[in-house]
Amino acid sequence: MRKVISIALGIGLIIIAVFIVKAMVAANQKPERKAKKIIKTVFVDIVKNKNIPITIKVNGNLVAKNRIEIFSEVQGILHATSKEFKAGVAYKKGEVILKINNEEEYATLQAQKSNLYNTITSIMPDVRLDFPEEYEKWRNYLTRFDFSKPIPSIPQTNSEKEKFFISSRNIYTTYYNVKNLEVRLRKYTIRAPYNGILTDALVNPGSLVRQGQKLGEFINPSIYEMEVAINASYSDLLKKGSPVKLKNLDNSQHWEGKIIRVNGRVDQASQTVKTFVQVSGKGLKEGMYLEAHLVAKQEENAYEIARQLLINNEKVFVLEDSVLALANVTPVYFKDKTVVVKGLKDGTAILSKPVPGAYYGMAAKVYNSTPTRK
C-alpha cells in the first residue's frame, strides 16, 4: 500500500512541475513583432545613348626610325677623330664618325692616277696627227687633272675610230680602275648620314678593324617607331595617318603619334596584324616601353558602364517604379574598367554602383533625386 502511495505522489509532483514550467515559459514570451520592410538606397544614372569611340590599348617598345649598324668594308688600324667613339656621342650630318688608316690604299690610288695621266700624255702626239679636231679636249682634260682630287670624267669620243683608238691604248680600263680605287678609299672614312647619336661602340682607336666587323650603332633620336600587334578583327579599321595617343606606364608623360604602316599579313599563331606607329617628341628614347591608344571605330547608339555592373555578360540592374529589374544588354567592347553595351533605351534609370545582395524585385529608392547623366 505504501508503495502505491509513493508512486502516486511522484506522478503528481511531475504533473505539477510540468504545469509550473509551462506557466513560466508563457510568462516570458514576448509578443510577435511584424517584420519591417527594408528599402535599399541606390545610385542611378539616366541612360543617354551616343556614339562611343572604340579605343584599342596596346603596348610596345620604341625603335629609332632611322637606325644603322656600322660595319667596316675595309681593314686597317682605327684612328682617333675629333670626337671620342663612345656611346652617347652626337654627330652632325657629314661629320666623321670613324677613320681607318688608308695610307696603303691612298698610295695605290695615286699610282693608278699617275698611270692614267702618263697613258693619256703618251697618246697626245697621235691624237694631234690623226684627230686634230679632238686634240683640244684631251689637252684640257690633262690640264684639269688634279692628283689631290677625284679624277674628272673621261672625254666623250665623237667617232668610232677615235673610240677604238682610245680603247686600244687601255685608257678606259685604267680610268675605271682609278674610279674603283676612289670609291674604295672613301670607305676608310665613315661619316654620319644624318644628325644623330651613337648608341653602341664596339671598338677603340688603335685597334685593328677587319673587313665585315661590326663597329657600332647610330640612330636619329628625333623620330621613333613602335610596332604593336592588333587583333585581326580590327585590321580593316586601321588607316594610315590615324592619330594615336601614347603615354608612359606611370602616366606622367604623353605624346601624339600616328599610324604610318599596317602589315598586309595576319600572323597565323596570334591572329594579329602588325601595325607601326610613328612618334616624336621630348623625352623619348629608344627602347622605352609605352602604352598606345588607337581609335579603331565609332560604336553608334551605345552606352558605357562599369564592368562590375554587368551580370553574366548579358544583363544589368535598372530601377522601375521603385523596384529593381533586369534589362538585357549586348556587350560590344570591353575596356579595363568599363564595357560598351547596346540595347538600353534612352531615359532608363540604370544602377551606377553595385548593390550588395541585389535581386530582381528588391524595393529601392534613389539616393539623389537628380541622378547624373552620361
Image (tube, rainbow, N blue to C red):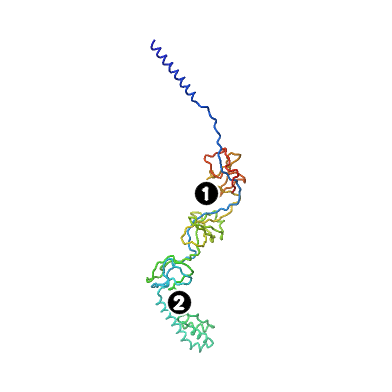
Q: Secondary structure at mark 1?
A: loop
Q: Which of labels 2 and 1 is toward the front?
A: 1
Instruction: Say which residue appears at 49% left-offset and 23% top-offset.
Output: 27
Where does residue 339 sit, x and y in percent of width and height? 55, 48
Label 1 amino acid? Lys
Residue lying furthest front in this view?
A: 27
Compared to residue 374, the image places residue 168 above or below, namely below
Q: Is residue 207 left or right of residue 252?
A: left
Where does residue 151 sit, x and y in percent of width and height? 48, 80
The residue at which mark 1 appears reads as 337
Q: Nearer the viewer, residue 179 or 335?
A: 335
Label 2 amino acid? Glu
Residue lying furthest left in this view?
A: 207
Where does residue 252 sit, x and y in percent of width and height? 49, 56
Res 71 → quadrant: bottom left
Q: Is residue 95 left or right of residue 318?
A: left
Q: Nearer the viewer, residue 362 or 23?
A: 23
Q: Earlier in the sequence, mark 2 or mark 1?
A: 2
The residue at which mark 2 appears reads as 182
Q: Secondary structure at mark 2?
A: helix
Res 86 → quadrant: bottom left
Give the number of the disc on residue 22. none
Residue lying furthest right in this view?
A: 346
